[in-house]
Amino acid sequence: MAASDRNALDARRLLLEGLVDYAGLFPPAALAMPDAVARYDEYRRGPHAWALGKFVVPVARLQEFEQVARPLLGSAEAWPLAAIMGTDFAADLRAVEDFVRRVAPDATVGAIEVKASTPGEVEAIANGVALLCRHVPDAFDTYVEVPIASDPTPLIQSIASHGLRAKVRTGGVEAGAFPTAEQLTRFLVACTAHGVTFKATAGLHHAMRGTYPLTYDPASERGTMFGFLNVFLAALFVSGGLDPADTRALLEERDASSFGFSSSGVTWRGRAVTAASMRDARARTATSFGSCSFAEPVTDLSSLGLL
């Protein structure tokens, strides 16, 4: 590998390391637990394991996960999980606590994810998490999924005041599930302005903005999806001061050659983010995205010469 390629790979790794939380249990893949666990185990041992994040599992299925994955746990590094909370938040917190007591240190709940639509709900989540933290010794992150059809700033402010993180839904299995570039820009700007770390979920199977099938059904409807490169590079550039109009343009960018990676960082149409800023933004601003496929992101990145 030439020195220039190694330098570019360094910047790509800053962007991509641990980026993909594997959500194979969720649509459109909707795999059975044994299949999802087997695939995650395979990915953990594969050549691109460095880009793999947590295994995403509903709290209601933690016991099922434990039964299926038990033979694989303890043989290597702990399995990091992201637990999706249901409607009974208090009961789910107790379930997480019980699960951690049973399986630690072979598996860890590195994050919990829960929905909220009002600042009062955010406060209730923060209070519940504070109680759980008294009993669960290992720290975890709390991501609060917020709606972004209207201005999410009050919710982002509440999330910031309680030291939580945000989660944004960037698509789904229907065309109407995708936010507009303007709505997503507003979310990114609000998170940056209030120092809130976020993750994304849904509709980010592909690296670049484009029109793709919405499910794996051969007769699937097609729709315009955000690319995960677009979303996470937009977050990095917003952290560096990119204005809303250019952020919208970056989110809608379809030309992968407009992005350049080097040992210095990443560029896009005459703008640049340094490697140091990339490292900081990944840690403090944009952590990961949930995808029901790990193979598709890897295939896209490979086809673009980014792996």
Image: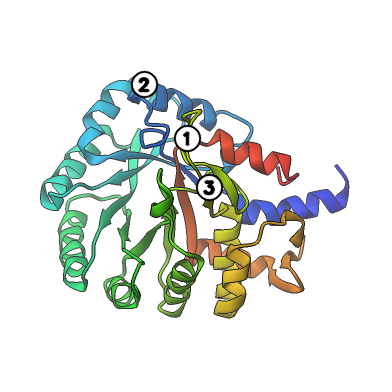
Judge the density around disc 3: few (<14), some (14-19), many (≥20) Cα neighbours within 10 Å.
some
Q: Position of residue 190 (x, y in %)?
A: 42, 76
Q: Residue at x 16, y 71 (%)?
A: 120
What residue is shown at x 44% (from left), y 69% (from top)? 183
Residue highlighted by disc 1: 220
In space, the residues marked 3 and 1 are separated at their CA atoms by 30 Å
Left or right: 91 in relation to 86: left
Which residue type carries mark 1? Ser
Query: In terms of sequence position, does the residue under pointer 3 or pointer 1 come before the other?
Result: 3
Q: Which residue is disc 3 drawn over?
A: 18
For disc 1, the neighbor class at 10 Å (few under 14, some 14 to 19, many from 20) is: few
Of residue 100 and residue 186, the one placed in the foreground of this image is: 186
Q: Check whether the beta carbons of the residues at disc 3 and disc 1 lie within 8 A of each other.
A: no
Residue 196's label in the rendered image is none
Query: In front of the other: label 3 or label 1?
Result: 1
295 shown above or below 251: above
* Element marked by disc 2: helix
The amino acid beneath tag 3 is Gly
The tag on residue 34 is 2
Q: Position of residue 32 (x, y in %)?
A: 34, 24
The quarter of the image holding the C terminus is top right
Cα separation, mark 2 vs mark 3, equals 23 Å
Mark 2 or 1 closer to N-term? Answer: 2
Quadrant (top left, top right, bottom left, bottom right) of the N terminus: top right
